[in-house]
Image (cartoon, rainbow, N blue to C red):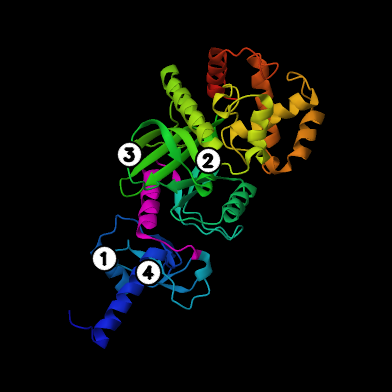
């Protein structure tokens, strides 16, 4: 193979830099002001020849900073406006853009248009100094739609959400559909959600959901009726929905039937047993391990814990350890202190919290503990060796699973 000369090397360096810009994103926008200060929206209805003609005869300006912007019409990226390199406005778009992100915003904008809703693409909101991807209005209520293709710091998401809420806008975060080695199929199954992806969990009638969108297939993917298994693992009902059949507010997935809930139940039991089996072997602390110590003092082998230990009591994981671990520690605490399982006061919970502060990092942990006590009471558990009816637990969890409180 011959060596590259300087000109060839320079050319490939420029090409690689362009690739990095596409991969990492750049300073791109889809709306601009024309010379008459009228807002121009770059939708996909414009043919390439039309855009070239516009670029040759029109000057466009950034809606925020009023600086001139270029209309870029490339072969890879969707047509877009871009600031000059030295623009002071670049920080507004510090996340950058990708071709997929641009396409997704176009598709969502066009979807809302077809639904005959009042919609704006990338409107700049001076009161918030923010620019949602799409702003939708229905029945005098504004919805800020954020289509998130890249990972951003969780505090940044929280700040944006708070800003929208304070401006009386309802924020809707839509995650780009994750790409897995095996494509998702419809049905109830185990999935993995990183802490960042878990930030997209929303609650509809008390059921945990995540709505994702894939611009490449123009389809939504729902992860609905989530049940945490611990760590990154959840059970979810996975459903695909084409953009042509989407409504707004977004369509909800039907509640699982009894037969479908039975699949949840079996998956949960299987994963619980696998966790308990692994848990015994991964610990290197022996009886210094609080969970193993609790099992020892209860006189119960780890793999043979009664089924009422490890119950999923919330839609997300509110404790720093798995459900079986904190529930076992709680029951050991009650046994050692001689407290009645069915008469738990806030004082007793606070005493347990002070003894195990690391378990209560999440502010919702106390509520989950209270819910667990309610379940034990409902299924008749008065002490660790209570006669246990698995059917009673199954029925109670099914009712709770469908509850809309």
Q: Disc 3 and disc 2: Cα gap in Å?
A: 24 Å
Query: How many C-alpha atoms fall within 10 Å of the one at disc 3: few (<14), some, or many (≥20)?
Result: few
In the depicted view, which residue is nearer to us: 358 or 90?
A: 358
Helix, strand or loop for disc 4: helix
Q: Disc 1 and disc 4: Cα gap in Å?
A: 16 Å
Indicate the quadrant containing the C terminus: top left, top right, bottom left or bottom right: top right
Residue at image position (80%, 34%) is 351
Q: Disc 2 and disc 1: Cα gap in Å?
A: 36 Å
**Which circle's residue, 2 or 1, is located before the other in the chain?**
1
Helix, strand or loop for disc 2: loop
Query: How many C-alpha atoms fall within 10 Å of the one at disc 2: few (<14), some, or many (≥20)?
Result: many
**Residue labelled with disc 4:** 20
391 displayed left or right of 262: right
Q: Is residue 230 visible?
A: no
Q: Disc 2 and disc 4: Cα gap in Å?
A: 31 Å
Disc 3 and disc 2 in contact, CB within 8 angstroms: no
Residues in magenta, as a range: 93-118
Against 56, residue 323 (above or below) is above
């Amino acid at each position: 193979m011959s060596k590259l000369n300087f000109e060839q090397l320079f050319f490939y360096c420029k090409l690689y830099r362009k690739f990095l810009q596409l991969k990492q994103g750049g300073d791109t926008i889809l709306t601009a002001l024309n010379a008459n200060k009228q807002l121009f929206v770059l939708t996909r209805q414009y043919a390439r020849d039309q855009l070239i003609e516009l670029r040759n005869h029109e000057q466009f300006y950034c809606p925020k900073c009023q600086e001139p912007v270029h209309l870029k019409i490339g072969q890879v990226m969707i047509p877009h406006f871009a600031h000059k390199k030295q623009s002071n406005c670049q920080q507004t778009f510090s996340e950058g853009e990708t071709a997929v992100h641009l396409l997704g915003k176009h598709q969502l904008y066009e979807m809302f248009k077809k639904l005959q809703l009042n919609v704006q693409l990338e409107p700049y909101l001076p009161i918030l100094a923010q620019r949602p991807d799409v702003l939708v209005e229905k029945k005098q209520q504004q919805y800020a739609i954020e289509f998130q293709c890249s990972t951003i710091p969780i505090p940044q998401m929280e700040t944006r959400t708070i800003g929208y809420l304070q401006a009386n806008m309802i924020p809707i975060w839509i995650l780009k559909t994750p790409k897995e080695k095996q494509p998702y199929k419809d049905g109830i199954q185990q999935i993995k959600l990183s802490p960042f992806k878990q930030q997209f969990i929303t609650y509809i009638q008390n059921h945990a959901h995540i709505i994702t969108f894939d611009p490449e297939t123009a389809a939504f993917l729902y992860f609905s009726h989530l049940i945490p298994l611990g760590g990154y693992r959840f059970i979810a009902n996975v459903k695909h929905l084409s953009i042509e059949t989407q409504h707004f507010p977004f369509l909800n997935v039907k509640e699982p039937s009894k037969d479908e809930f039975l699949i949840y139940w079996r998956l949960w039991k299987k994963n619980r047993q696998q966790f308990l089996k692994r848990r015994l072997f991964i610990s290197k602390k022996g009886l210094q391990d609080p969970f193993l110590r609790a099992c020892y003092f209860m006189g119960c082998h780890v793999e043979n814990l009664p089924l009422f230990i490890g119950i999923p009591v919330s839609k997300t994981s509110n404790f720093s350890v798995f459900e079986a671990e904190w529930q076992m520690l709680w029951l050991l605490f009650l046994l050692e202190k001689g407290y009645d399982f069915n008469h738990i006061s806030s004082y007793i919970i606070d005493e347990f919290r002070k003894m195990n502060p690391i378990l209560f990092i999440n502010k919702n942990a106390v509520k989950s503990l209270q819910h667990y006590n309610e379940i034990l009471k409902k299924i008749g558990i008065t002490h660790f060796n209570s006669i246990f009816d698995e059917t009673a637990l199954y029925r109670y969890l099914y009712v709770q699973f469908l509850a809309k409180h």
